[in-house]
Amino acid sequence: MLPIKFCLSGIDSSVRYRNRQAPRWRLAFALASVLLFGLSGTDVTAQAPLVVSDETMPGENTDVDHLDNIYEIGGGAERGELLFHSFESFSIRSEEVAEFVTADNISTIFSRVTGEEFSDIKGKIRADEVDLFFINPAGVTFGSGSSIEIGGSVVFSTAESLVFAEDNSEFSSIDPQDAPMLTVSQPIGLSIGEKSKGITLEGAILDDGFNAGETVSLVGHGIEFRGGGIYVDSGQVELVSLAPGSRVDILPRQNTFFSPLGIDDSNFTNLELRDIRLLPGEEPEIPPSFIEVDTDSSEAGRVLLRGRQIELEGSQIFNRNFSDQLGGSISIIASEELTIDNSIISTDTYSAGDSGNISIEVNGASADLNIANASTISADTYSAGDSGNISIEVNGASADLNIANASIISADTYSAGDSSDISINIRRNLNIQGTSQLRSRSVNATGAAGTIKIHAENLSVQDGSIVSTSALVTSPALASNPDLGNAAGGILVIATPNGSIVLSGTTGNAGEMTGSSLFSRTLGERADEEQSNEAISINARKLSVLSGGRIDAGTDGSGDSQGISINATELVEVREEIDNLNRTRASAINTASDSVSTGDSGPLSIVTSRLEITDGGQVFTTTSGTGNGGDLIVEADKVVLSGSGTSPEEFSLFGLFARTRGRGDSGRLSVTTGSLEVRDGSRLTVSTPNPEEPLPPPEEPLLAENFGTVRDAFIRADSIVLDDGKITAESRSGDGGNLNLEVRDFILLRNNSLISATAGTDGSGGDGGNITIGNVDMPTRFIVTVPNEDNNIFANASSGSGGKINIAAQSILGFQNIIGLPSDGTANIEDIQENITNDIAAISEDGADGTVLINNLELNPTEGTVDLPTQTVTLGQVAQRCLADSAGNNAFVVTGQGGATPSPRDIIRNENLAASGVSGELGDANAAAIVEADGWHRASDGTVVFVAQVPQAAVADGSHYHSCIGQGVAQSLAESKE
């Protein structure tokens, strides 16, 4: 009997490196089995044999010799290097051994069971240096204590027959015939039929009996592990669950009969899958379900699970690499649904060879992939080899991927090897919840972190969960190593055109806010200056960062951050929940470098239809080290900055800003929009720290005068509304920045609003910056404020010179003091800062005043008007001395001929211009011309008659009338009095 061998299968998901000693549970389990079998005193010779030949191959029948607890299996039908066996029943008790005896020329054994009983394997199956195919459609069960010691590969299947493609012959269990009369050299198939049952492991440990590089395949109508598992060294483990009518082909390899089943659909005929379940043991002493492959040689192993509904509960699938060759992969394909619950799937490398890839695919139309309860999917490296890629696809049109309850998907490096990529493709929703992590990290390593790529309709990151690529040094003892803290990878998120992305925090039991993050950051004290972390890139219809959520890219080392790029067709919103007063940080999108960093923090770009930063949200770039801050660029149809929050971070700056808190320069700020609104304490600013703000703790004390330069802010908009809002380019020390506002329509300032390029806000030196509003080519139409609301435009300085304010506008309304014009004298800076009037000032407290230049462009009074008729009526037809009616009954109406408007540009006010009493009949075309009346007289009956010739009697000129009264009466002077 071969010696008992034990293998490794750790059960603690938090332990990353497992030494190769047997775990306690496996050793205890094996010793208990040995003691039980050795001391039971059972008389095995008195029990009926369970391995029985069926006599279906006359002259070549299988011979079974049963001696004590050993079944010696010989005979059978030889076909070249192939040997066929046929059994009426095949089961092995826990203390028994079934051993296949073969000639040296035999390479493959085909065994079938033709009876109605399932094979209950509780003992050992043994053979030397051969491949074994075993089929029993009634089912196969491996009980606790079972083992397989086969020198080659094995296939256990509940197929009804083995199919040989060369002449379509079969070696069938349900219609037993003689063995095929051929030398098999073509692919064979396992055909699942209506009578095919499942395969079950009940606490079995199938381990070190396999030679390196071999394969263990289970193919049945359903597969279930109830504790226990399979271990192979440098080989393959394949679980395939098929429905009746399906067939899987097994391809030749290197002139031998066996190769892995594969995962391509070309291996299958009438493919329809059934379920696979890896579950916890039903008894406390039964180990958790596991599949484990360790690669020690050049032959990489692989694990394949392919089924309809696959359930992993409390189970472990490992494919680890201890060689200098490429490690093996893990592939899980579910045609309907996959659940991973409190389980581990891992391809890690502990040597110079790369770890294998992990591929997970779920194809059910509405079947979710659920990864929950501290489950881990990892492809990590602990040595010079690179980690493998992780690929997850959920292809159902209405299916989601849910990662919940502190679960982790990781491709990390802890040594010289690089992390690889994580790729997730989902047609619908990716939900990451409950402090779960999707990450690629470089931890105390010289290797670089990888990239995370997400394609989904919607992405939701909530409850303190994180999507991150980062490089960090966590050990103080390693902090001085200049090679550690290498580059972080990038994050690419692409949502479908109708999709959205939501990052949202949650409130814990103590009321503390826990934010969720997209995070790409180099956190080591030093970063390799030749490497830089890639950008976070987001494409979506809508992006929401809420309740402490964060999108963060930055550096703490010498490597530069490559920043953040966001393109959202509809909306980007960054909002804090104002009813939660216990948050630990504001909702934010930012790039930043810390005080020890020499690298640049990287740019931040947002392109969207609408940007809303409200209730204490923040969008910013900042530097606290010697590296420069990144540029902040916004392009949006509308930008709304509104409200302030309660977070102490960034010291009450809420809105849109580019800052320096160190020796590096701030980034530039550029906003292009149709409408900009800054309200309720929000800011748009480039600046150094506020005077009351504590400074960061660098290695050397940072004096106020050592701050970097405040860069410029440029705003191009149709309109700007400031209502208790600020647009500033201020410095605590040093020169103020420059503000350039190209505004077409208007700027409205209300309620203590400010536009400022002030220098020396803490009383230090520095010249005021420049403010430019409008220009000669495109002046702002209106700059408007309400008197006595303390709305100001400042370019002041403390001890340096005042700045320059240059305004080109058609109208400036509501400002009471304009200080800095050439005719103005020196003003007191404290007075204009403390008064309630609206001021425009460019002055200095101790230095030279600046200048204010206002180019108040004249309005064109004819702009937008139309040409009027030069003569409305004939002057001779209007009474020149008609007095006004004191009763207000007079009217003067001008119409054109025939009731038309006087000018063709005027609006026609009557749809029917025909005079009343006029018929539609055509008159005599030769009628006499109508002579226009130019006078009137009163007939004897009092009727007024209009005549072409005025009677020669004297006509009153109307000067003695108090008014001209009467409907239809016209005053006319036939002739002017000479």
Image: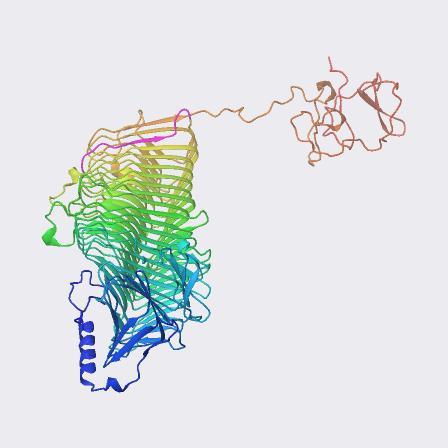
Q: Is residue 615 visible?
A: no
Q: Position of residue 279 (x, y in %)?
A: 32, 70
User: Is 656 situated left or right of 396 in this image?
Assistant: left
**Which quadrant would residue 928 be assigned to in this image?**
top right
Asked whether 642 or 190 is in front, the reply is: 190
Asked whether 499 or 143 is in front, the reply is: 143
Where is 265 relative to 808, above or below?
below
Asked whether 9 or 54 is in front, the reply is: 54
**Which quadrant would residue 554 be assigned to in this image?**
top left
Where is 497 relative to 276, above or below?
above
Q: Is residue 801 visible?
A: yes
Q: Position of residue 29 (x, y in %)?
A: 21, 76
Where's the C terminus, which quadrant? top right
Asked whether 954 or 794 is in front, the reply is: 794
Q: Position of residue 443 (x, y in %)?
A: 19, 52
Where's the N terminus, which quadrant? bottom left
**Residue furthest top in the image:** 978
Q: Position of residue 548 (x, y in %)?
A: 31, 55
The stretch of residues the image draws in magenta is 764-777
User: Is 911 situated left or right of 189 in this image?
Assistant: right
> Taken as a whole, is the magenta stretch helix, strand or loop?
loop
User: Is 747 situated left or right of 483 in this image?
Assistant: right
* Figure label count: 0
Q: Is residue 60 magenta?
A: no
Where is 436 relative to 90, above or below?
above
Q: Is residue 771 magenta?
A: yes
Colouring scheme, one of rainbow, by chain, secondary structure, one colour: rainbow
**Which quadrant would residue 665 be assigned to in this image?**
top left
